[in-house]
């Protein structure tokens, strides 16, 4: 294993993050504040609690997931797409490193960034509401798994994308709707039975449900199923990335 | 001299069916400077890309330092530094971070003194903390070389390193390449500039349409294939070539005030002595005589044209 190469990629990627630290930090804080003002205070004050949880607190796991998923995809996809776009990918391809080392470097950096943002949002949430996290270790584990799986997905999107438009296409047209319809701001038990069934085909439901379970000890779907779903999703992403590097699809002529 | 890169029967067919390389065989010797000449689309960049791991080969085998570039890619690539044709650099990073990254990618431990030395050699030391975006075009070219040298490679591939570079910088780069040769670095450069190959290469390879047409020692190549031209200036102009001289392939130039005569340097009889005698017999008086060696460019053009025929 070329650990120095992994460290080089990770450090190089993180330095980009630190160059724009203010933006990286302020943007999620601001959007979280807006969500709390709009959903938590303006709308939430007119709503009853959901499954016994105050609505303001109920939306916290969904809000964190929303940002973590989109940030993981955006950081990882940009991380690998940018070298392709400016041509510096030649260095990666000509270096004595394996696909696994490249993935660990880029995905590790993307994970770190989105984990940081997730924790910033959680910290901001404490400013607005009283939160009692029932299973903090499980919460961190779920957060890490989500950062990992969506960073892997982002990495695939970054390799697939042939333009900046394509880079934003999947997150905008697929991921954001899935996250919004995956129970970020509501419990799927609030939906009519037919839509409850349809929603179960949305993989994001399992992630948000599992994450919410770590906060409140209750979930839309069983925690075991949530874990299985996120594990399966991670495995699929890893297999796709392994295939990409084996065949050189979109990166090696 | 042992081969440091061994290329055997390498072919490359792209997915659209285009055959970029067709059974290429090439042995690159340790510590030499090999210039690979060829027109656009000849296969120069494809060959380099395959050796360095950017592109995969369709058939054949390549070994670098005895290691197969596919099955033993880590060992093979550790030995190689690549300077690409296009300027490809992370614009917002600093010069130093950029070369630190390159060194790290190749698994080398931190060595700031060595990196400082590389920057000094390439006259970039005073820019070590500058962002890449602020560098001039020539500095960016030099930074690409610094990145390729950051992991102390034994073999350096330069893919048209001086394309679009002014004459002064080009000569600076030649000096750098010569310095590297003295340190034992094997250099393979592709170029359009015959002058470049003529100035720094030990051996010349000519590639066209995916075929290596020849690989030969530069001096021997010029001696073997080089033709010389003799220019004979006359004291008085002539209207046509006199009958006595009609069996020589002479050309009347300068409005009849001179003849040019091309001869083969490797030929046993160049015909110069008899020509000069016959000129006197024809009553022509000479004012001056000059000779000119044909350049590598003439040789290259001749070779490529010959193959086209």
Image: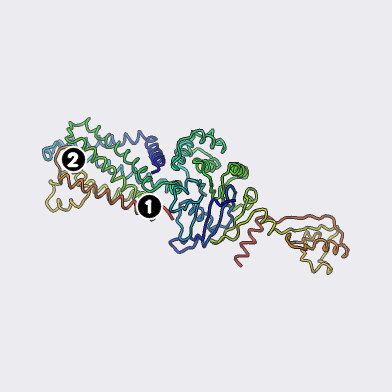
Q: Nearer the viewer, residue A91 or B112?
A: B112
Q: Looking at the rendering, which quadrant does residue A227 occupy?
A: top left
Tag count: 2
> Which quarter shows the C terminus of chain B?
bottom right
In front of the other: label 1 or label 2? 1
Mark 1, residues whose alpha carbon is within 10 Å: few (<14), some, or many (≥20)? Answer: some
Task: Answer above or below: position of B281 versus A221.
Answer: below
Position in image of residue B304 (x %, y %): 61, 62
Task: Answer above or below: position of B306 versus B62.
Answer: below
Q: Chain of mark 2?
A: A
Position in image of residue A160 (x %, y %): 36, 52
The Cα atoms of the two marked residues, 1 and 2, are separated by 35 Å
Mark 2, residues whose alpha carbon is within 10 Å: few (<14), some, or many (≥20)? Answer: many
Q: Which residue: 23% across, 41% down?
A: A142
Which residue is the site of mark 2? A212
| Left or right: A203 as drawn, with respect to B23 | left
Secondary structure beneath label 2: helix
Q: Chain of mark 1?
A: A
First in residue order: circle 1 vs circle 2: 2
Which colouring convention does the figure follow?
Answer: rainbow
| Left or right: B239 as drawn, with respect to B300 | right
Secondary structure beneath label 1: helix
Q: Looking at the rendering, which quadrant does residue A145 occupy?
A: top left
**Same-chain status of marks 1 and 2:** yes
Residue B105 numbered tag:
none
Position in image of residue B46 (x %, y %): 50, 56
Which residue is the site of mark 1? A245
């Amino acid at each position: 294993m070329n650990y120095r190469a992994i460290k080089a990629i990770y450090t190089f990627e993180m330095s980009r993050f630190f160059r724009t630290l203010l933006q990286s930090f302020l943007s999620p804080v601001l959007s979280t504040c807006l969500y709390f003002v709009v959903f938590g205070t303006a709308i939430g004050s007119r709503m009853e609690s959901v499954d016994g949880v105050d609505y303001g607190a109920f939306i916290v796991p969904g809000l964190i997931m929303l940002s973590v998923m989109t940030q993981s995809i955006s950081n990882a996809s940009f991380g690998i797409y940018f070298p392709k776009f400016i041509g510096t990918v030649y260095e990666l391809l000509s270096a004595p490193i394996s696909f696994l080392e490249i993935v660990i470097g880029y995905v590790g950096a993307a994970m770190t960034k989105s984990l940081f943002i997730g924790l910033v949002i959680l910290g901001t949430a404490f400013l607005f509401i009283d939160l009692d996290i029932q299973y903090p270790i499980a919460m961190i584990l779920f957060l890490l798994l989500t950062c990992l799986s969506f960073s892997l997905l982002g990495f695939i999107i970054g390799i697939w994308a042939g333009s900046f438009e394509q880079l934003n296409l999947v997150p905008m047209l697929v991921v954001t709707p899935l996250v919004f319809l995956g129970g970020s701001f509501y419990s799927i038990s609030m939906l009519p039975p037919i839509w409850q069934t349809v929603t179960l085909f949305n993989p994001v439901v399992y992630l948000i449900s599992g994450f919410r379970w770590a906060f409140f000890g209750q979930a839309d779907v069983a925690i075991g199923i949530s874990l299985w779903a996120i594990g399966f999703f991670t495995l699929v992403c890893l297999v796709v990335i392994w295939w990409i590097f084996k065949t050189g699809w979109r990166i090696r002529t | 001299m042992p081969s440091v890169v061994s290329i055997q029967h390498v072919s490359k067919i792209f997915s659209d069916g285009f055959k970029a390389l067709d059974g290429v065989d090439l042995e690159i010797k340790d510590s030499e400077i090999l210039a690979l000449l060829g027109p656009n689309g000849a296969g120069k960049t494809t060959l380099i890309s395959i050796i360095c791991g950017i592109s995969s080969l369709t058939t054949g085998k390549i070994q670098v330092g005895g290691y197969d570039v596919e099955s033993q890619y880590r060992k093979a690539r550790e030995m190689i530094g690549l300077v690409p044709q296009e300027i490809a650099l992370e614009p917002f990073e600093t010069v130093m971070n950029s070369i630190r990254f390159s060194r790290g990618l190749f698994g080398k431990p931190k060595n700031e003194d060595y990196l400082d030395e590389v920057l000094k050699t390439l006259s970039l030391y005073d820019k070590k903390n500058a962002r890449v975006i602020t560098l001039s075009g020539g500095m960016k070219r030099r930074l690409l070389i610094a990145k390729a040298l950051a992991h102390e490679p034994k073999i350096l591939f330069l893919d048209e390193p001086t394309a679009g570079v002014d004459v002064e910088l080009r000569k600076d780069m030649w000096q750098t390449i010569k310095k590297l040769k003295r340190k034992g670095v094997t250099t393979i450069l592709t170029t359009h500039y015959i002058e470049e190959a003529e100035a720094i290469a030990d051996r010349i390879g000519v590639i066209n349409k995916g075929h290596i047409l020849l690989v030969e020692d530069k001096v021997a190549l010029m001696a073997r294939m080089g033709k010389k031209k003799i220019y004979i200036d006359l004291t008085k102009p002539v209207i046509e070539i006199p009958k006595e001289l009609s069996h020589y392939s002479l050309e009347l130039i300068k409005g009849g005030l001179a003849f040019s005569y091309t001869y083969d340097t490797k030929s046993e009889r160049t015909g110069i002595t008899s020509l000069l005698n016959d000129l006197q017999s024809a009553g022509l008086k000479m004012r001056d005589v000059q000779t000119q060696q044909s350049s590598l460019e003439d040789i290259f053009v001749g070779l490529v044209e010959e193959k086209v025929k």
